[in-house]
Image: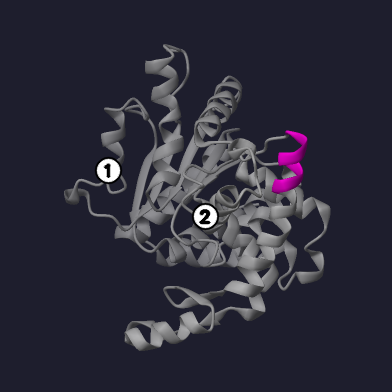
């Protein structure tokens, strides 16, 4: 990881003030937290997988710098889309200039646009649908139930997609997570392309038991169990990329355990950092400053807290490189 050492040196020399300084503080806090034996949950919103965050996140997972992930259904599936269809993606650098007619032309080519990048429907979405439908229907027939990420783990471990790989698998964060059997929590999975496909197959009758894919409430129960067992041995930190349900869902496990289950010996989150582009004055949960979380019994007064108001696609890889460059 020579490049990570070089990036770390560059950041330490140049990033001295404002959001740049906050980035350094957060990265050093992250590294210190892990070096002291802490475990880190990474919450990932937005389109980070389509932004190919796996290029740095996968190595963080392999080097035990990330110990659990909460992500949207979109990030879960889009890492696999990129794995099997990377060469068919189309980048649109002038996306701000597109007319409605231009957008309709992309539709006619079965290209689904995410800012400057188009996901190819046939090579990505439908290719994964064929593989995962086989897993869903098999589980449905045998009465088995799995979480969304577990179905994708099963596909990756089966090797049935290997002939389609178009990137080095080491650059897939989900592949790295699969190899580690990393705990993943996917709140609101139904708000994803694969979730929509699953609903369609339930409506069509291809899947008889709608609960063949396990639910968000079960994810919270799984998270509560993981947090309780892990926090009994080591502090747990929270590194949040973006906002929304990927962050709000997992961070709430602590007040749920303490206030609703009355387990007052459960410790609070021991590190917190958010990369945010949200505005506090709009009343958004995503834009809330870290101190607001003290009132919800998520963070303590003494919890190290960082917020970097910037573009996550720029900041997250820099922080990951900084942390990796230490070793």
Q: Would you say residue 209 sits in the magenta stretch? A: no
**In front of the other: 112 or 290:** 112
Locate the N terminus and report the quarter of the image it occupies: bottom right
Dot 2 corresponds to which residue?
A: 196
Q: Is residue 88 left or right of residue 28?
A: right
Q: CA distance from mark 2 to mark 1?
A: 33 Å
Q: Is residue 236 among the parts visible in the rendering?
A: yes
Dot 1 corresponds to which residue?
A: 289
* Res 248 → quadrant: top left
Q: Does residue 147 lie above or below 193 as drawn? A: above
SS class of the residue under badge 2?
A: helix
**In front of the other: 318 or 98:** 98
| Residue at the farthest front position | 205
Q: Position of residue 94 (x, y in %)?
A: 39, 87
Q: Position of residue 85 (x, y in %)?
A: 66, 73
Residues rendered magenta in the picture: 136-143
SS class of the residue under badge 1?
A: loop
* Residue ID at (41%, 67%): 14
Q: Position of residue 155 (x, y in %)?
A: 75, 53
* Residue ID at (48%, 58%): 316
């Amino acid at each position: 990881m020579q490049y990570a050492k070089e990036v770390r040196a560059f950041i330490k020399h140049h990033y001295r003030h404002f959001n740049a300084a906050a980035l350094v503080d957060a990265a050093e806090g992250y590294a210190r937290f892990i070096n002291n034996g802490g475990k880190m949950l990474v919450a990932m919103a937005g389109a980070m997988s389509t932004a190919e965050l796996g290029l740095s996140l996968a190595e963080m997972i392999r080097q035990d710098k990330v110990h659990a992930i909460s992500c949207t259904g979109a990030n879960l599936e889009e890492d696999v889309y990129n794995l099997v269809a990377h060469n068919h993606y189309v980048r649109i650098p002038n996306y701000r200039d597109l007319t409605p007619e231009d957008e309709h032309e992309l539709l006619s080519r079965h290209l689904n646009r995410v800012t400057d990048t188009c996901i190819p429907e046939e090579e990505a979405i439908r290719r994964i649908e064929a593989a995962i439908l086989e897993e869903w229907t098999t589980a449905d027939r045998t009465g088995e139930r799995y979480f969304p990420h577990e179905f994708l783990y099963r596909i990756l471990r089966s090797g049935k997609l290997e002939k389609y790989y178009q990137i080095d698998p080491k650059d897939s964060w989900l592949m790295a997570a699969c190899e580690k059997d990393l705990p993943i929590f996917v709140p609101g999975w139904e708000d994803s392309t694969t979730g929509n496909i699953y609903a369609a197959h339930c409506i069509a009758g291809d899947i008889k038991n709608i609960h063949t894919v396990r639910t968000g409430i079960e994810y919270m129960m799984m998270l509560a169990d993981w947090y309780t067992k892990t926090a009994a041995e080591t502090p747990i930190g929270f590194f949040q990329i973006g906002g929304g349900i990927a962050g709000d869902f997992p961070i709430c496990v602590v007040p749920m355990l303490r206030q609703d289950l009355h387990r007052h010996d459960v410790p609070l989150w021991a590190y917190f950092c958010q990369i945010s582009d949200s505005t506090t004055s709009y009343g958004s949960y995503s834009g809330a400053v870290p101190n607001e979380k003290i009132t919800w019994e998520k963070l303590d007064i003494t919890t190290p807290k960082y917020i970097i108001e910037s573009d996550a696609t720029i900041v997250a890889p820099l922080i990951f490189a900084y942390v990796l460059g230490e070793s």
